[in-house]
Image: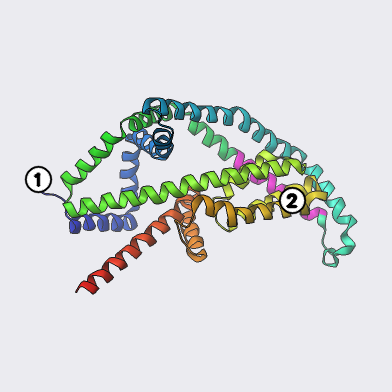
């Protein structure tokens, strides 16, 4: 059997890229059909990929047998999901509904505060604050209504796929329980159908992808959860309402470098301004110090310098990833750029070593 060589493999990739830009519907349709047919296996593989480091920790550090490690792992996972849907979701829904219901009252309180201190800000002299706030209220309510409609449709779509999710979890357990077998099988498939050189390069690339992506995603998730938890605790002490809503937003936006923490501070300050104006400045200072703690202490300790991307390339990665894949693109763009940079540097190092030998 003739194996696929590097030039042929490169040619196939170039044809796919050309087709993607000249006839995007063909590739989208083909991959869509493939993904829908194998979705339970793909999702199961992704779940097992993300949970594998925790399984390794139980097996190697705690010396727990695999079957018991998997039992503990999935029991903890289902327990966390149960707590999330029974505790977090109802309170989050209540936060949003209360915010929408009390919004006119907050606008009135804010308008009164502005009128009280209006003389301190001459540039507000000719501005009709009430009209501007009412216009903001209308736009906000329209936005929330649209978002609620979208979230409901998404929720219904998710509930329709519960059976698929259950099967994905079952397959993830099977993949984790027999991971050595599937690892060996994937190697045999590569060695059978690809040339030795190409197979070796794909294996090396897969190891780098696992190290960079798993390291970043697991580290950034832990970092964001810690920052979100500290934010919720601090905002609770400062008597700011809607801490569940704010904590979730701060956790999510913490995945976006540079701009994300700023958005979190603005959201916290806005809620404080409407609900507890006396503590607004304290909330801004607290969230700003929290983000500095994250940037200088927590994130370097958890992630280290593994990505080593400058501010320019980080922002470029987030912008490009977000424009192509939305929220998912923002999350995976940074490790993708970091991996590309690492491969580029390795290529340069390899070329330089060849030149020295010659």
Whether 103 is drawn above or below 257: the answer is: above
Marker disc for residue 76: none
Marker disc for residue 283: 2
Left or right, 152 with respect to 67, comes to: right
Q: Earlier in the sequence, mark 2 or mark 1?
A: 1
Foreground mark, 2 or 1?
2
| Residue 205 appears in view | yes
Question: Which quarter of the figure has residue 52?
Answer: top left
Image spot of residue 195 (x, y percent): 16, 52
Front one among 143 and 350: 350
Image spot of residue 299 (x, y percent): 55, 52
Left or right, 3 with respect to 129, comes to: left
Please give the residue where the numbered disc 1 appears in the rendered image.
Answer: 1
Which residue sits at x=65%, y=44%? 230
- For disc 1, the neighbor class at 10 Å (few under 14, some 14 to 19, many from 20) is few
**Magenta stretch in the rendered image:** 130-148
Question: Which quarter of the figure has residue 53?
Answer: top left
Does residue 321 show up magenta in the picture?
A: no
- What element does badge 1 sit on? loop
Which residue sits at x=28%, y=71%? 352
Which residue sits at x=36%, y=50%? 209
Whether 179 is drawn above or below 12: the answer is: above
Image spot of residue 256 (x, y percent): 55, 53
């Amino acid at each position: 059997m003739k194996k696929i060589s590097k030039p042929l493999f490169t040619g196939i990739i170039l044809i796919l890229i050309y087709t993607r830009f000249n006839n995007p519907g063909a590739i989208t349709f083909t991959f869509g059909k493939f993904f829908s047919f194998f979705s339970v296996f793909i999702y199961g593989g992704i779940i097992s990929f993300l949970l594998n480091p925790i399984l390794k920790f139980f097996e190697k550090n705690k010396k727990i047998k695999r079957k018991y490690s998997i039992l503990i792992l999935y029991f903890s996972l289902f327990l966390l999901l149960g707590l999330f849907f029974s505790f977090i979701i109802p309170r989050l829904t209540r936060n949003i509904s209360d915010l929408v219901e009390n919004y006119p009252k907050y606008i009135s309180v804010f308008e009164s505060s502005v009128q009280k201190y209006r003389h301190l800000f001459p540039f507000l002299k000719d501005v009709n604050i009430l009209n501007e706030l009412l216009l903001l209220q209308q736009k906000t309510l329209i936005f929330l209504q649209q978002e609620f409609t979208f979230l409901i449709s998404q929720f219904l779509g998710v509930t329709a796929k519960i059976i698929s999710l259950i099967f994905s979890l079952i397959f993830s357990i099977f993949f984790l329980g027999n991971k050595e077998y599937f690892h060996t099988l994937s190697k045999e498939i590569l060695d059978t159908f690809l040339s030795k050189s190409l197979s070796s390069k794909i294996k090396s690339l897969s190891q780098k992808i696992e190290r960079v992506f798993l390291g970043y995603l697991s580290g950034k998730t832990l970092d964001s959860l810690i920052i979100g938890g500290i934010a919720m605790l601090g905002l609770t002490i400062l008597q700011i309402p809607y801490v569940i809503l704010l904590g979730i937003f701060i956790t999510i936006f913490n995945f976006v470098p540079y701009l994300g923490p700023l958005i979190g501070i603005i959201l916290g300050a806005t809620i404080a301004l409407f609900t507890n104006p006396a503590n607004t400045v304290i909330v801004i200072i607290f969230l700003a110090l929290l983000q500095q703690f994250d940037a200088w202490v927590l994130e370097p300790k958890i992630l280290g310098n593994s990505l080593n991307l400058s501010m320019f390339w980080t922002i470029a990665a987030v912008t490009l990833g977000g424009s192509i894949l939305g929220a998912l693109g923002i999350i995976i763009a940074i490790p993708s750029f970091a991996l590309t940079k690492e491969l580029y540097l390795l290529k340069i190092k390899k070329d330089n070593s060849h030149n020295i030998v010659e």
